[in-house]
Amino acid sequence: MKPRIFLALAMLSSAPGVMADPARQDDQGWLKTMAFAAHLTDYSGTFIYQSGSHVEISRITHVSDAAGEHERLEGLGGERREIIRNNDQVWCYLGDGKVLVKKREGGGAFPALLPEQLSALNENYLIRQGEEDMGAGFHAHTLIFQPRDNLRYAHKMWSHSDSGLLLKAVVLDEPGHVIEQYAFTQLTIGGNIDRKWIVPDKSPDKLLDKSQRQQHQQHIVAAPGTTAVAVVSGWQVGALPDGFRKILEMRRTLREGKAPVTHLVFSDGLAGISVFIESLANKPEVRPGLYSQGVIQIYSKIVDDNLLTVVGEVPPRTVLQVAESVYFGGQ
């Protein structure tokens, strides 16, 4: 499964705008259909994720019924990697381990890549229709999201012409080369979708007493050995690109860490940027610098006695701009 699905069980976000082609009066309605299709449609299929030479194959099953949304995501190959979600309750299975986590903020996992609130997309991207095409054996409409500046990547999406379900999505660099893509290789929409894996709601609020519920609501279990608490840390970003909004701020205590890590998450509706601040003593052997992992850019630098790391689904210049503007404004 794509690392950022787990790493950013915290990453992505919002009112109508004007599409690039004024002759098409139903474009905004179609964009809304696309945004909700992954939540309202029953489907099951296999999709491929590719970034450079890195390729992963996953199977996803999604059912929407009177009880809400149910989703199962399985990594194919290697040890067990599986996420099962019933509304806001999410279980992760890694090998023989199992952990309960809260639902990630905002979304962003294929095929639910579009935010439910759409104003951010029109503010940050010029959106136009592309060609009619095929995807996973279905007729597809295409939309192209061209950034309004050079601080984010372009996106192209193929959606099922009947339901609006996303069939394929690519991220394009400035020359127009594909640097990341998701695509269904096999897909069933509607019909007899397997539901045997769906379990009744066993949310902590129903299982715990009052004191336990209060304690649970104050903590987010993000991974085995990890806790996180929402905070106002005092850390600020002075040169955040236009259109990015803070959607999360927390302090994590990692199992292997010697001190808490402050984590801020920003989104423009399609791309996410995370800022991590931790004591330099927590990472004595770290080497500052810029690293790339496909569409992900990672930049680390030392600020006083802290290690600052910016991770983003954005061009290198953007993580550098963000990192150079981070400062502590006081609490």
Image (cartoon, grey):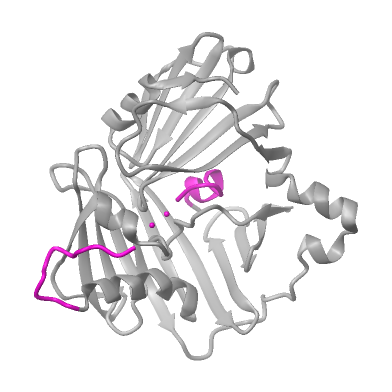
Q: Position of residue 44 (x, y in %)?
A: 48, 77
| 40 w.r.t. 6: above or below | below
Between 2 and 19, the one nearer to me in the picture: 19
The total of numbered circles placed on residues is 0
Q: Position of residue 184 (x, y in %)?
A: 37, 69
Horizontal relation, residue 173 to residue 308: left or right: left
Main secondary-structure element of the magenta-colored stretch: loop
Between 226 and 187, the one nearer to me in the picture: 226
Q: Can residue 190 be spotted in the picture?
A: yes
Whether residue 20 appears in magenta in the rendering, the answer is yes
The residue shown at (72%, 75%) is: 199
| 293 w.r.t. 88: above or below | above
The residue shown at (24%, 76%) is: 140
Between 251 and 64, the one nearer to me in the picture: 251
Horizontal relation, residue 161 to residue 110: left or right: left
The residue shown at (36%, 47%) is: 268
The residue shown at (67%, 53%) is: 101
Residue sitting farthest toward the bottom: 191
Between 162 and 292, the one nearer to me in the picture: 162
In the rendered image, which quarter contains the C terminus?
top right
Q: Name the image quarter holding residue 249.
A: top right
Q: Name the image quarter holding residue 288.
A: top left
Q: Name the image quarter holding residue 204.
A: bottom right
| 225 w.r.t. 205: above or below | above
Q: Which residues are magenta?
A: 2-25
